[in-house]
Image (tube, helix red, strand yellow):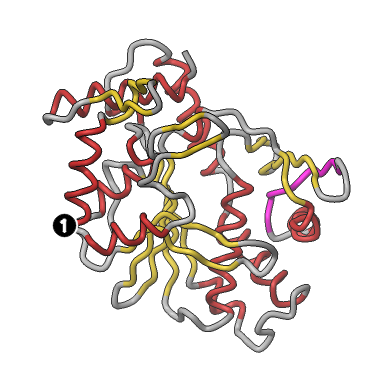
Amino acid sequence: MELNKILDYAIMADETAKKPIKSGYVTNGKTYDNYLSNDSFAEFVEDMKTNHPVAYEMYGKGGGKELEERKSGANVYPPKMASFGSSSRMIYNLMKDVDGFLFEKKLPTTVGGIANLDGFTETADKCVFVEAKCREPYTSKDGIIERKYEDLYKAITASDKTAVSCDIYVIDERKMEVKFMSGEIEIHSFDMKQMISHLLGVATAYLKGEFDKKIDFIYLLFNPKFIEINEGKEEIHSIYEQTCNECNSVDFKALFDVIVDYLQTAKGLSKDKNKAEIVNNFSFRLCDQSNMNI
């Protein structure tokens, strides 16, 4: 069985042992055992709609269509948020009762597309951005990326401010294959491509004057060591530790510095803004479900 599904079932066993929820979502004549049952998911959605209407609206309108069944050709799949290993469901359950916490935050990146962050809130002195990961590190990545990021990746590699480098192999006029490194460490399990996109979104927002407080970026990574896992336990724990090590090998303030500089110099975005002040206000934290706090 694939590791991401093993993790799903382990989370399912842990949750169903603690509260009366059932598994086994049925759609198009097929049962998905690693998802909430239709009735349990309907109750989950109804509770969100009634008690957390802002979250319900955000997830309903979000680009991921987290609450809807998904279609691909003749196949129909359960809603993403019905998965026991859903990152959106994880952060929602952790943060739904925190006043002012918003889900599915969208930020334009200037370089290309929209950065979709899992969470955002403002306190008196800071803006908190959250990216959540649960089962994602246990799925394979092909490293294929659109070439609209090529100039930025080259700027990151050329900079002496960060140890992050991007080895690029051009496939065609639209696509390239990229291997990310942090010094001598290959970034394989940690999603560096998405993280760079998120930092682009945060930097763009600050340069445009949408925010002016301290920046606290939280990477919320589900820790599988808090639940019982039988099959695949050592491999899952190893990948989790590898993801943490890759993440901890990166100086994200330095990487953020390079990205802000690129947006100002190469893209001409808000050149008059004080880059040093924005970068000095940036901090990064790696958290898990036991120590997530704002």
- Measured as percent of width and height from the top left, residue 277 is found at 54, 79
Residue drawn at the location 68% of the way across and 80% of the way down: 269
Residue 62 in which image quadrant: bottom left
Q: Position of residue 191 (x, y in %)?
A: 57, 42
Q: Residue 215 colored magenta? A: no
Q: Position of residue 97 (x, y in %)?
A: 18, 57
Number of marks in the image? 1
Q: Which residues are magenta?
A: 162-170
**Residue drawn where x is 86% and y is 40% of the image:** 171
Nearer the observer, 119 or 225: 119
Above or below, 9 relative to 286: above
Q: Which residue is the extreme one toward the top?
A: 231
Neighbour tally class for label 1: few under 14, some 14-19, many 20 plus, Cα within 10 Å: few
- In the rendered structure, the answer to whether residue 231 lies left or right of residue 262 reads left
Q: Is residue 211 left or right of residue 156?
A: left
Between 244 and 3, which is closer to the camera in this rendering? 3
Which residue is under mark 1? Answer: 50
Which amino acid lies under the numbered mark 1 shown in the image of this protein?
Thr
Q: Quadrant of residue 213?
A: bottom left
Q: Residue at x 52, y 72 (%)?
A: 280
The C terminus sits in image quarter: bottom left
**Picture coordinates of residue 10 (x, y %)?**
31, 21
* 134 left or right, relative to 145: left
> Mark 1: which secondary structure?
helix
